[in-house]
Image (cartoon, helix red, strand yellow):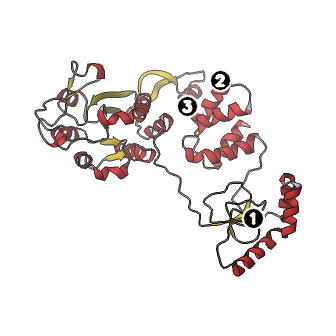
């Protein structure tokens, strides 16, 4: 059954991998949940679904495999038989409701009656039980009550009994630019990978073991180094001031990055990069690291990520002494250019919505200094940034 679950998810275009399936089996083997369908649903969803857009596909496959729910294909456009609808509504309507519907003659009669009212009525009507108006019991209009009617000119329903809504209805596309959570950040960061096998040989080399055993005629166990992500990341985090309102998302990004990148170094700065950065905000005035040391210590193949809203006075970027906290001998733009010259792969993640960037001169200046490689700190923006770094 579990293998069927895995294969049907793949057939439904949910991108699950064999490794994730094995993790799920290991979790079940270690009894991390009770033997209940609901618990298994949430466990499997957490392990197998990496993008919210696949949740609906996952739910459909899960219901089909484990709950006996019939799998639904594309909607064929066939009409539901009237007899089915009639039997279904009889379960939920009161005797009074049924009598009212019968008195009107059903749906077709209701539409005919509406057409007649539109021809006959020539003025606004409020209250009453016949004309198209408001606040009455007529089957047609708004802000009234009728067990079966046509809602006209009302922003939204109140009783949920309208059989038709005669209004222009506007719907919004689902937004893929929403701010991230830690799990989504981890998934996006995984796009930046370079797998290598380094270190001690501690992992079983199954194919090598089989080949060696076949050649030698006895069990020949072979080991190999574990496959690791060899990407090295240098993370610069803007802290304080206008960044205080973005603390939550920055903490989630920082936590996810430390999990995904085993070889990562980080430093803090305020507003713009200058001659010194620090690792402990409580001792930032006493224990600073010269930026020159950072540029010389970490090789040019490091991937550099700046995180900041780029919101500051333009003087902080363009002029010596522009920093709000100290006298900087060289302008922030000089230091940003030096970093861009040393590290080919560099991006800036901005937690401010992209639509607001054009209102800030400093944002435009920073964007120019990083060669246009500024991305919003959203799901789509983070994925684009990782693709840029992976080039």
For disc 2, the neighbor class at 10 Å (few under 14, some 14 to 19, many from 20) is few
User: Is residue 242 or residue 191 the one in the foreground?
Assistant: 242
Query: Who's the residue at 62% across and 37% down the image?
Result: 45
Instruction: State the separation of the CA atoms marked 3 and 1.
Output: 70 Å
Answer left or right for 334 relative to 8. left
Instruction: State the separation of the CA atoms marked 2 and 1.
Output: 52 Å
Q: Label 2 belongs to which residue?
A: 32
x, y percentage for residue 12? 64, 49
Query: Who's the residue at 62% across and 35% down the image?
Result: 21
Query: Who's the residue at 83% across and 64% down the image?
Result: 81
Q: Nearer the viewer, mark 2 or mark 3?
A: 2
Q: Label 3 belongs to which residue?
A: 207
For disc 3, the neighbor class at 10 Å (few under 14, some 14 to 19, many from 20) is few
Q: Label 1 belongs to which residue?
A: 149
Question: Which element type, helix, strand or loop, lies under badge 2?
Answer: loop
Quadrant that contains the N terminus? top right
x, y percentage for residue 189? 43, 38
Question: Which element type, helix, strand or loop, lies under badge 3?
Answer: helix
Which residue of the protein is positioned furthest toward the bottom in this rendering?
A: 119
x, y percentage for residue 3? 69, 38
């Amino acid at each position: 059954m579990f293998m069927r679950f895995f294969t049907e998810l793949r057939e439904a275009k949910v991108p699950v991998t064999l490794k994730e399936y094995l993790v799920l089996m290991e979790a079940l083997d270690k009894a991390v949940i009770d033997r209940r369908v609901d618990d298994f649903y949430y466990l499997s969803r957490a392990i197998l679904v990496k993008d919210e857009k696949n949740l609906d596909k996952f739910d459909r496959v899960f219901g089909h495999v484990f709950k006996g729910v019939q799998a639904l294909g594309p909607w064929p456009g066939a009409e539901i038989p009237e007899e089915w609808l009639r039997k279904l509504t009889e379960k939920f309507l009161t005797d009074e409701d049924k009598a009212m519907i019968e008195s009107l003659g059903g749906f077709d009669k209701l539409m005919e009656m509406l057409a007649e009212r539109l021809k006959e009525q020539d003025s606004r009507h409020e209250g009453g039980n016949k004309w198209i108006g408001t606040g009455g019991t007529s089957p047609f209009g708004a802000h009234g009550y009728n067990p079966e009617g046509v809602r006209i000119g009302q922003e939204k329903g109140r009783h949920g009994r309208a059989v038709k809504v005669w209004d222009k209805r506007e719907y919004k596309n689902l937004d893929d630019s929403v701010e991230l959570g830690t799990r989504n950040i981890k998934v996006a960061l995984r796009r930046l990978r370079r797998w290598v096998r380094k270190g001690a040989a501690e992992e079983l080399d199954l194919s090598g073991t089989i080949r060696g055993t076949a050649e030698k005629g006895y069990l020949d166990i072979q080991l190999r180094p574990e496959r690791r992500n060899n990407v090295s990341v240098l993370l610069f985090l803007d802290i304080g001031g206008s960044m205080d309102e973005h603390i939550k998302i920055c903490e989630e990004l920082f936590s996810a990055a430390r999990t995904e990148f085993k070889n990562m170094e980080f430093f803090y700065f305020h507003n713009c990069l200058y001659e010194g950065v620090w690792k402990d905000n409580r001792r930032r005035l006493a224990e600073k690291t010269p930026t020159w040391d950072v540029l010389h210590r970490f090789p040019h193949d490091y991937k550099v990520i700046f995180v900041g809203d780029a919101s500051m006075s333009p003087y902080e970027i363009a002029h010596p002494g522009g920093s709000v906290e100290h006298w900087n001998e060289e302008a922030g733009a000089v230091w940003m250019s030096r970093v861009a010259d040393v590290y080919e792969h560099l991006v800036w993640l901005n937690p401010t919505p992209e639509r607001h960037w054009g209102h800030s001169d400093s944002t435009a200046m920073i964007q120019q200094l990083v060669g246009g490689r500024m991305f919003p700190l959203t799901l789509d923006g983070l994925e684009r940034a990782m693709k840029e770094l992976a080039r």
